[in-house]
Structure formats: structure tokens, C-alpha cells
């Protein structure tokens, strides 16, 4: 099976703000920008969406920077926004580098994994992170099947995308040390 998206290419566009496309009536999904009398929809990265002011004046000039790719299956141009700047000088925060993303541990909660000790692994992970002062820095997210049912309990450490099978509660401290090392100065997370 071939990939449907080609290489990402950086872009920078200046245009007039036409409004937002909202999801669930209040979440920013796309920015509508007019460039040379043509409307484009730009999709801001998730960390950026929370910081976009919803009171941007219509028809104000914005500089949008990001990455574009062409979907070879559908022939559509995909535009990801990494930064927005009002030409008056006001900036929205840029997307943080990948290393600064909040770490997450995905734990399968389907029956095979849960029966094989997934609940105990989850509890041990929560308590282990709290002991290290990382309870706020690392998300624990229960997920659906991770496609390794016979090798459960299964988990994935993000953003490393490192998969682990047959995890036992006694394995958790070494996983925390391996992926969520803390510095000597005040528990800053390095992933």
C-alpha cells in the first residue's frame, strides 16, 4: 500500500481573514483566508488552535506560515498552519517543537489486555509518575485495541511511539526511567 501524501513543503502566505470553520460550535478547525481573490482553508496544528484569538477582525491582514502537501489520491492540497501573525505585529504563539509536546502513555483497555493485568499496570504507572513528580507532565490515556491482543497488556509511549507488550507492574519503574527522565533541578521532563 503506497502513501497518499507527498513531502511537506514550507509555505508563507499573506491574506485577508474571512472567518473560522468551527467544530462543535466553538473549537477552531480551519482559518478561512482570502489570497488573490481566492479562499483557502488553513488547518492550524492542535497546540496552536487553543491560542488563536476568536476576536480577529474580519478582513484584517494575516501572515500564515506552515507546511503544505499534495494528497496524491485525491489531488487536494493540504495546508497545516504552524504560525499566524497579524500584520499589525500581534502574534499568536507558534507551535512548540516536538520535544516540548506533552508526553502520553496509551494503554489498551480491551478485555484481553485488562484481564492480563492492564488495570494493575495502569495503576502502577499513575502512582510511579506521581512519585517522580511527573503526574502533571505525562498523560495516561486508555485506548481501544493496539492490535497485539495475545501479547497483552500493551502500551505505547508517545511521542516516541515506542510499543511495549506483556507489560507487568514491576516493569513500570524502568519504563518511567527510560522515557521520562527528570533533571536534578526541579522535575523538568525530557522525552
Image (spheres, rainbow, N blue to C red):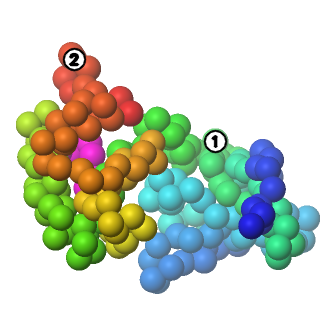
Q: Quadrant of the N terminus?
A: bottom right
Residue found at the far top of this picture: 184
Q: Which residue is at a point 42% across and 45% down the rendered structure image? A: 162
Q: Nearer the viewer, residue 128 or 43?
A: 128
Coordinates of residue 14 in the picture (x, y in percent): 80, 53
Give the residue number, with chain letter if any, for mark 2: 185
Numbered marks: total? 2
Q: Quadrant of the C terminus?
A: top left
Give the Cα distance between marks 1 and 2: 36 Å
What segment carries the magenta color?
134-141
Say whether marks 1 and 2 touch (CB < 8 Å). Answer: no
Name the side, left or right, on which 64 lies relative to 190.
right
For residue 89, the mark is 1
User: In the rendered structure, does residue 41 fall within the stretch colored magenta?
Assistant: no
Q: Nearer the viewer, residue 111 or 124?
A: 111
Q: Can residue 88 be seen here?
A: yes
Note whether 131 is above or below 167 in the view shown: above
Q: Earlier in the sequence, mark 1 or mark 2?
A: 1
Coordinates of residue 39 in the picture (x, y in percent): 81, 73
Note whether 75 is above or below 61 in the view shown: below
Name the side, left or right, on which 135 lies relative to 150.
left
Q: Which residue is at a point 46% across and 48% down the rendered structure image? A: 161
Q: Can residue 34 be seen here?
A: no
Coordinates of residue 66 in the picture (x, y in percent): 70, 49
Amino acid at each position: 500500500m503506497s502513501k497518499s501524501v507527498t513531502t511537506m513543503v514550507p509555505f508563507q502566505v499573506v491574506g485577508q481573514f474571512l472567518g473560522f470553520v468551527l467544530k462543535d460550535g466553538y473549537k477552531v478547525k480551519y482559518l478561512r483566508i482570502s489570497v488573490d481573490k481566492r479562499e483557502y482553508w488553513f488547518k492550524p496544528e492542535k497546540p496552536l488552535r487553543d491560542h488563536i484569538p476568536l476576536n480577529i477582525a474580519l478582513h484584517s491582514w494575516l501572515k500564515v506560515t506552515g507546511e503544505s502537501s499534495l494528497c496524491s489520491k485525491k489531488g487536494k492540497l493540504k495546508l497545516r498552519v504552524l504560525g499566524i501573525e497579524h500584520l499589525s505585529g500581534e502574534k499568536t504563539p507558534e507551535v512548540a517543537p516536538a520535544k516540548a509536546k506533552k508526553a502520553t502513555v496509551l494503554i489498551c483497555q480491551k478485555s484481553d489486555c485488562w484481564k492480563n493485568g492492564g488495570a494493575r499496570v495502569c495503576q502502577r504507572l499513575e502512582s510511579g509518575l506521581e512519585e517522580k513528580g511527573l503526574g502533571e507532565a505525562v498523560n495516561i490515556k486508555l485506548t481501544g485495541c493496539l492490535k497485539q491482543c495475545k501479547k497483552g497488556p500493551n502500551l505505547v509511549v508517545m511521542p516516541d511511539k515506542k510499543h511495549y507488550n506483556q507489560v507487568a507492574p514491576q516493569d513500570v519503574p524502568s519504563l518511567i526511567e527510560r522515557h521520562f527522565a527528570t533533571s536534578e533541578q526541579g522535575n523538568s521532563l525530557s522525552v
